[in-house]
Amino acid sequence: MAENRLNTVDLDSELSQKSPEEIIEYALDTFDNIAISFSGAEDVVLIDMAHKINPDKVQVFSLDTGRLHAETYRFIEKVREHYGIEIDVVFPDSNAVNQLVREKGLFSFYKDDHKECCSIRKIGPLRRKLLTVDAWITGQRRDQSPGTRTSIPAIQDDKAFARPDDSLTKFNPLANWSSQQVWEYIRSNNVPYNELHDQGYVSIGCEPCTRPTGPGQHEREGRWWWEEATQKECGLHAVNIKQ
Amino acid sequence: MKITLVKKIKQDGSLCKKCEEVQQKMEAAGQMAFIDEVLIADERDPSSPGMELASLYQVERAPFFVVERDGQPAEIHTVYFKFVKEVLNQKTQEKDELKEILNDNPDLDFI
Ligand code: SF4
């Protein structure tokens, strides 16, 4: 139980000034039951950093949607062996997938949008996994989304996935890093990476929903490219209203 | 217990999409009967009652619910299904819960 709720708002202004390694160190020092979410892409840098900071405390999980590239499965295995760590590969609820596929086929996301399939294949297992930890670490970065209002804090109180009457803390150590900084780290530290990156893939997700991007294209354009790039606007934007 | 629902009016004068969806769901499920007050957070007017409440409780999402119980600090709920489960003690569909989480957190696309 994470009885000691952190003041994540104050901590964020402090941690946002720190390096990813310092944020990870803080996270590992603060929480015993903490896991790194690994998507099989460039977020491998989190594992590398955490492994250097405290190899005994690296708990990693990956969401296997059942639709990943063969290259990604190979890469997950490579990472497991390279760092000598356990990777908890979590799967979607088979009944929910079965129902979706029976009713809408294997490619429903091309007709509807990716939300239904992603919520069954990714969010469901993610939630199940997060119910078992007090904190988690993601590779989310601000520059992954073209939206100008995107705010990815270094630390946040994760209300969506918290157990009832409990808290869950989410760390995004790479929030302020650019894709280029991530790649500089990978190269200079000889970190293993997914072979798809050498084939022009910048952002890597499921096979049917990911494509390589060309020069000048934002990495988001390599994901769900058939959907309109609209921004979800649920926030309350009081700023600039007056003028 | 007093429950206040705060809905958002966007800068173009329309109701925010999620507020509309939540309201429809609540009406269909008869949950509006549990709401004591509905306030509007008008993005064009920072002094509108809903905007003031949002700034008081530092809420950045709409719609949201303020639950006040005697002698206890106000509870803020920004996740509709959690509000339904934890405050109204009613059942929700897992499918709807997961969709709401993804809709509210588009950054999860990169997990
Ligand atoms: S990325 Fe595509 S295949 Fe993977 S879970 Fe989402 S919609 Fe389904």
Image (cartoon, helix red, strand yellow):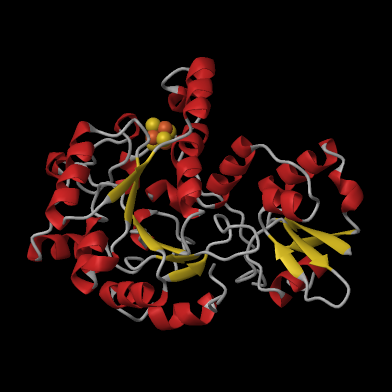
User: Would you identify the image quadrant in which residue B91 lies?
Assistant: top right
Q: Quadrant of the N terminus of chain A?
A: bottom right
Compared to B23, does A190 lie above or below? below
Query: Percent position (x, y) of residue B36?
Result: 91, 58
Q: Quadrant of the C terminus of chain A?
A: bottom right
Q: Quadrant of ligand 1?
A: top left
Compared to A139, does A15 lie above or below? below
- A192 and A107: which one is in front? A192
One can see residue A230 in this view? yes
Query: Percent position (x, y) of residue A190?
Result: 8, 60
**Residue drawn at (76%, 73%) of the image:** B52
- A228 and A134: which one is in front? A134
| B62 left or right of A83 in image | right
**Residue drawn at (40%, 70%) of the image:** A32
Query: Percent position (x, y) of residue B79?
Result: 66, 54
| A96 left or right of B39 in image | left
Query: Percent position (x, y) of residue A193?
Result: 15, 50
- A238 and A167: which one is in front? A167
**Residue drawn at (19%, 43%) of the image:** A77
One can see residue A218 in this view? no
User: Would you identify the image quadrant in which residue A103 lies?
Assistant: top right
- A68 and B63: which one is in front? A68
